[in-house]
Image: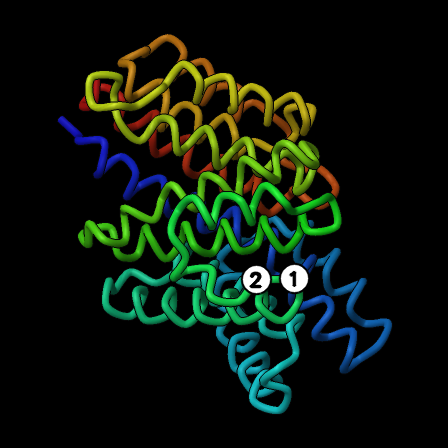
Amino acid sequence: MYTPYLRHQRSSKIAGWFALVGVFLLSGCASIMGSVTGGLASNLSAAILNSDDPAMIRDGAPSYLILIDSLVAGSPDNSTLLAQSAELHSAYAGAVVEAPVRAARLNSKAKAQILRSTCLSLKNACGLESRDFDEFSAWVDAQGPSSVPALYNLGSIWAGWIQGNSSDFAAIAQLGRVKALIQRVADLDPEHANGGAFLYLGVFETLLPPAMGGRPELGRQHFERALTISNERNLIVKVMMADQYARLMFDRELHDRLLQEVLAADVQAPGLTLTNTVAQKRAQLLLDSADDYF
């Protein structure tokens, strides 16, 4: 039988792919390439996000890591470049890297960069990590709609760092800060990143069974909200709901129905084709292992 921790370990790869695709060009490489090659960026962005060949995109990622490292080296106080670098390094660590030590190193680099970027871009945002929780929460609650992209990036990258250090209780203790950031995004702009905040919230609430403090029914509500916001076009949400919620609750009927819906769906959707292709591959793996799990 799988433990909640192992279940989350598997899901982190999907979360990493979700981040990788969302970041790869929309918020990161498109802007980077735009500064270098002008009009090429928008066409390159569309080509990647609408690709149905995840392996090709994955294999090309190291080139972008090297490119952005060189750009950050030339402009170390550029908050936009720091954020883009953090997003890409975090996504690559979560989606591609298997070696724990290497993934932890990439996640630590990403976390340091996003904290520095936030310090440079938002008011009174320096030293967030060292503040006590009440002071941190007060700062989060004071943020308005214009801060949503920065809050979402900070929360998602911080979550990746926690996942990469999941054997460290001091790291796990920081999950409350990440939840506060993501919840603020959900409150301020529910539709940001295709409802991505609710996908994260759904995962957070289904990490543990009720007897251990989890709130899976609330998690299910978050997953359903993410589905509604994306008009069910973002297939990763159903995969995560099956993996995180249905397996946690041993709901085989829901588990299989969600995954079969993913497999039957058309992966072609503007800006989501790549993530949907990955979602279908993951859905098949989960279905294939269902008899052993349940």
Closer-to-camera residue (58/11) = 11
Furthest-top residue in view?
Answer: 253
Say which mark, if any, is on residue 146: none
Closer-to-camera residue (73/11) = 73
Q: Mark 1: few, some, or many residues within 10 Å (few <14, many ≥20)?
A: some
User: What residue is at 72 percent from the left and 60 percent from the top?
Assistant: 45
Local secondary structure at mark 1? loop
Furthest-bottom residue in view?
Answer: 74
Count of marks overlaid on the render:
2
Furthest-right residue in view?
Answer: 39
Vertical position of residue 129 compared to residue 284: above or below? below
Measuring from the top left, give residue 228's x and y in whole percent.
65, 21
Closer-to-camera residue (292/2) = 2
Measuring from the top left, give residue 204's x and y in whole percent.
39, 33
Vertical position of residue 33 compared to residue 281: above or below? below
Whole-angstrom CA distance, mark 1 to mark 2, is: 6 Å
Q: Quadrant of residue 90?
A: bottom left
- Find out whether the residues at labels 1 and 2 contact each other: C-beta distance under 8 Å: yes
Instruction: Quickly name the residue at label 1.
Output: 122
Measuring from the top left, give residue 189's x and y in whole percent.
70, 36
Measuring from the top left, give residue 133's x and y in whole percent.
39, 46
Local secondary structure at mark 2? loop
Figure colour scheme? rainbow
Check the picture and name the quadrant holding the C terminus: top left
Q: Quadrant of residue 2?
A: top left
User: What residue is at 57 percent from the left and 62 percent from the top?
Assistant: 125
Task: Indicate the amino acid at tag 1.
Answer: Leu
Check the picture and name the quadrant holding the N terminus: top left
Say which mark, if any, is on residue 125: 2
User: What residue is at 61 percent from the left and 34 percent from the top?
Assistant: 186
Residue 220 relative to residue 168: left or right? right
Task: Indicate the amino acid at tag 2.
Answer: Ala
